């Protein structure tokens, strides 16, 4: 049986739900900063809670739950005001987003990356070197190493997108 985007929330821990409920008062406080009427505030709190339940996997345990909720609320306000349009997400991307990484996905990614010419600076960054150390070793300027890293990251991201 394949997972659907809605099914991704079935394994959400009860502790997360309890934590979200315990922060309801704080959400109301934040909502007062963004909206004037009670109805607008209520709608914003509910949309933020819904957004948190949908994106619960994005919360880093040990991170600031308050900051994460405030960011989600800000996103809701921004989308509502029309300053930013939500991205259209394909069914395949939505499915990928809601499922855990699996061996097939990892194999596709490994195959795509193996077909690329490897970048020494990115390999060294992945190994824990700093840009400064790589720059000194290669004898190039700060801007040159930054541009090289950006260029190679874009290439990798393009390959990953094509593989996905």
Image (tube, grey):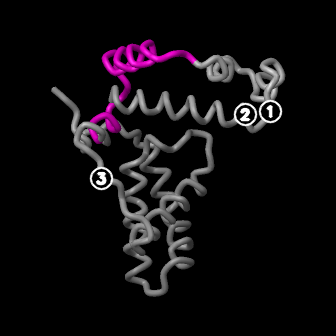
Query: Which residue lies under the disc numbered 3?
Result: 88
Where residue 86 appears, x then y in whole percent?
36, 59
Mark sitting earlier along the chain (3/2):
3
Q: Position of residue 134 (x, y in %)?
A: 76, 22
Can you tell which mark lies on residue 144? 2
Residues tagged 1 and 2 counted as in contact (Cβ below 8 A): yes
Looking at the picture, how far across and down is residue 15, in whole percent?
46, 43
Counting other residues with Cα less than 10 Å from the Cα at mark 2, is it few (<14), some (14-19), or many (20 or more)?
few
Is residue 6 rendered magenta in the image?
no
Cα separation between marks 1 and 3: 39 Å
Q: Nearer the viewer, residue 106 or 13?
A: 106
Q: Nearer the viewer, residue 118 or 53?
A: 118
Query: Which residue was labeled with disc 1?
Result: 141
User: Foreground mark, 1 or 3?
Assistant: 1
Highlighted magenta segment, given as a residue range:
94-118
Q: CA distance from mark 1 to mark 2?
A: 5 Å
Element class at badge 1 = loop
User: Does 22 appear above or below 129?
Assistant: below
């Amino acid at each position: 049986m394949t997972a659907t985007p809605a099914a991704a929330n079935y394994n959400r821990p009860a502790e997360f739900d309890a934590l979200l409920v315990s922060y309801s008062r704080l959400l109301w406080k934040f909502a007062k900063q963004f909206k004037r009427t009670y109805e607008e505030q209520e709608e914003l709190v509910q949309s933020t809670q819904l957004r948190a339940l949908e994106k619960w996997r994005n919360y880093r345990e040990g991170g600031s739950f308050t900051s994460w909720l405030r960011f989600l609320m800000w996103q809701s306000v921004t989308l509502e005001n029309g300053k930013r349009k939500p991205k259209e997400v394909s069914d395949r991307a939505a499915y990928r987003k809601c499922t855990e990484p699996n061996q097939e996905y990892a194999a596709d990614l490994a195959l795509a990356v193996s077909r690329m010419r490897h970048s020494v600076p990115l390999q060294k960054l992945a190994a824990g070197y700093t840009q400064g150390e790589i720059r000194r070793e290669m004898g190039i300027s700060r801007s040159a190493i930054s541009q090289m890293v950006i260029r190679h990251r874009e290439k990798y991201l393009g390959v990953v997108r094509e593989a996905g």
